[in-house]
Image (spheres, helix red, strand yellow):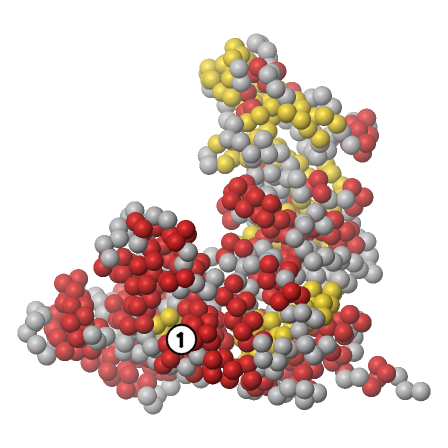
Amino acid sequence: MSDPAAASPSYLQGLNEIQSQAVQALDGPVLVLAGAGTGKTRVLTVRLAHLLSTGTARPGEVLAVTFTNRAAREMRTRIAAILGRPVEGWWLGTFHALAARMLRRHAEKLELTPSFTILDTDDQLRLLKQVMAAGQVDDKAWPARFLLNAIQRWKDRGQGPDKVPQAECGELAAGRIRTLYAAYQQRLRELNACDFGDLLLHCLTLFQQHAGVLAEFQQRFRFILVDEYQDANVAQYLWLRLLAQGHRNLCCVGDDDQAIYAWRGAEVGNILRFEQDFPGALVVRLEQNYRSTGAILKAASSLIAHNEGRLGKTLWTDGDPGEALRIRGLWDSAAEARFVGEEIEALQAKRESLASMAVLTRTGAQTREFEERFLTLGLPYRVVGGLRFYERQEIRDALAYLRLVHSESDDLAFERVVNKPRRGLGDATLRSVHRAARARGSSLTAAARLLTATEELRPQARKALSAFLSDLSRWRGLAAHANHTEVAEILLDESGYTAMLQQDKSADAPGRLENLKELVVALAEFENLGGFLEHVSLVMERSGDENREEVTLMTLHAAKGLEFDTVFLPGWEDGLFPNQRTLDENSLKGLEEERRLAYVGITRARKRAIFSFAANRRLHGSWTATLPSRFLGELPEDCVERESDQGLYGGAGDRIWAASAGRSAEPERWQIRRMTPGLARAKARGDAAAPLLEIEPVRGQAGGGYETGARVFHRKFGYGSVAAVEDDRLTVDFDKAGRKRIIAGFVVPANRAG
């Protein structure tokens, strides 16, 4: 009797039963709920390979959508390895890249040409500022970046200027935001340009106003597959729904428990209502985790189970239960940084790789303490999220030159480089060019060319502008038959840009020259200049040396999709995490997203997760007493170990001070109501008191219970004696700082200062 497994394709072997079901369910809508570490990427790539290998679909009939270009490249490489050959002719890429590809095929239906430019954020801001100036909207009262964010939010929801609800406009741009939005869109069309939001918005307009175009794409794509579906915004969701109405073979892979990007437009409701949107859909849950220990998975599952807005699944593993998760309470953020540094050194002494460790913070501002501590200890580290390569000034300038060579009508590129390096072309010359362009309805380049043939400009300016235009024409002619990397090198030299940096005596000039050399290297990876420019417009990724032995410092949001042996999770305090602003703005919905973020943080850990919180933290320049995060109380007792600095908190009936879980501006007094049995036993043994305690507010206790003559300690002023008590204020004679009047909540008894 033959073995069924032996008869199946090799790429299906090694999949577990549920993964295999997700791969082979090809007919009709399918939702794959893929928990953290359950082999989602493998399922995704094998499903695509299965479609192509079996002949179920030809490459051109498959639309595969990813959220990053990196994920698209990885998928392309993996599928080529499975099939033993590269795949050509299929539609694989990000939402924006695929939408741009569709738009270029039908650009004329939207008053654009196929060579339209995709503007980055810097150019979008400059363009909006021009529109604001023309509309006499005060940029100081209404910053362009703020208004651009509002416009982009509407675009992410698929709303053009005519569909923005009046209730959302309010007094934005002095009540003229919709007019400003419409003028901005009109200016983009005149420039033959789009911003990122337009790529999906224009596609929706195209599909809704041109049924034949929609039918063409619906018929083409027999199978649609989407990664990270929980991160889709409304416009992306509508785009997918329209395309999927043809064959209904839509497979969305995602995890509702890892939906953490509402702040940038993602809508978790998209994945939660999948079965309502696509009746009869098959839902496959991937729950067997191949990354983390049993203790980590139990803690993560217990935490996320407190969320109501979820489809439900429980991660499990047949591997080792592993170490208990540790929760450490510390006096302040400096002590927290010292603790993390010591733990890293201890792990390093056991030959654990620094690259296998990460410190994941709720906010970027938290990293400062850790950076300073790591520098003191000599621990190599990297902070993920610095200035990206394509955002550097010299790279932006070089790209503007290349864009202008590629498209003469790129007015924003013209403005950026016409006097860089300086050619004696000041604001007056540029204003003359702008007037001529408006009068003739032409691009700035065309208007400048006409002006040089007249007497309207000063002789010196006319000569300099003529020389620039002559260079531009020569580079454009060169680009028609020369290699695009050679064109880039020539224009950087002939424009004087390279010489400008060579003459620059500042410390960063050599590095900027090296960056330009690296840009030319990047150009060589693309077949032509147009392909490279589109790539730059769609993605700005920072790549690092993955082999370097460094501890990683990053925010929880940036950590999604990554994994480390050891994960440090500092700052788990109410108000910081969950973040109070998120709670204030979004209430229960915000709390659930914060809990999903906590879940993401825990599930980044393969072997160990170490939580910490500080009893005192400096916020906005002032010290604030804090309470442990409510999320710590949602972790199961049988898989965590709780510990704290000696004397951080006392026993039942002892009073502590803390901000009221971030719910009020003034501190409130609290007292410990009850210790859990485990904490009580620890106290009886004389161990340090664990930090997680049941507490209750104490009302009407003047001065926090301090009496005249009591010895106290203040984080800034040191030791002192209470001279007077009035309500919640103390007058304290400090040993070194003299007499101060302070809030009682900012001191502790002197015998607990250690």
Q: Which residue corresponds to the image point at 38% horizontal and 86% vertical from the top-left? A: 483
Residue 268 shown left or right of residue 422 in the figure: right
Indicate the amino acid at tag 1.
Answer: Leu
Please state, as top left, top right, bottom left or bottom right, where the C terminus lies in the image. top right
Q: Which residue corresponds to the image point at 47% horizontal and 83% vertical from the top-left? A: 212
Residue 172: in sight, yes or no?
A: yes
* Occupied quadrant, residue 161: bottom left
Please state, as top left, top right, bottom left or bottom right, where the N terminus lies in the image. bottom right
Give percent across and percent down for residue 496.
25, 72
Give percent across and percent down for residue 61.
59, 85
Residue 64: in sight, yes or no?
A: no
* Occupied quadrant, residue 526: bottom left
Secondary structure at badge 1 equals: helix
Of residues 346 and 570, the one drawn nearer to the viewer in this rendering: 570
Q: Residue furthest right?
A: 1
Could you classify mark 1 by the number of other residues whose Cα lies within 10 Å: few (under 14), some (14-19), or many (20 or more)? some
Position above or below: 502 against 217? above
Give percent across and percent down for residue 684.
81, 26
Q: Which residue is mark 1?
A: 533
Residue 495 shown left or right of residue 546 in the figure: left
Of residues 100 and 493, the one drawn nearer to the viewer in this rendering: 100
Q: Which residue corresponds to the image point at 18% horizontal and 70% vertical from the top-left? A: 438
Q: Which residue corresponds to the image point at 60% horizontal and 71% vertical from the top-left? A: 226
* Occupied quadrant, residue 420: bottom left
Of residues 132 and 725, the one drawn nearer to the viewer in this rendering: 132
Residue 126 shown left or right of residue 667 in the figure: left
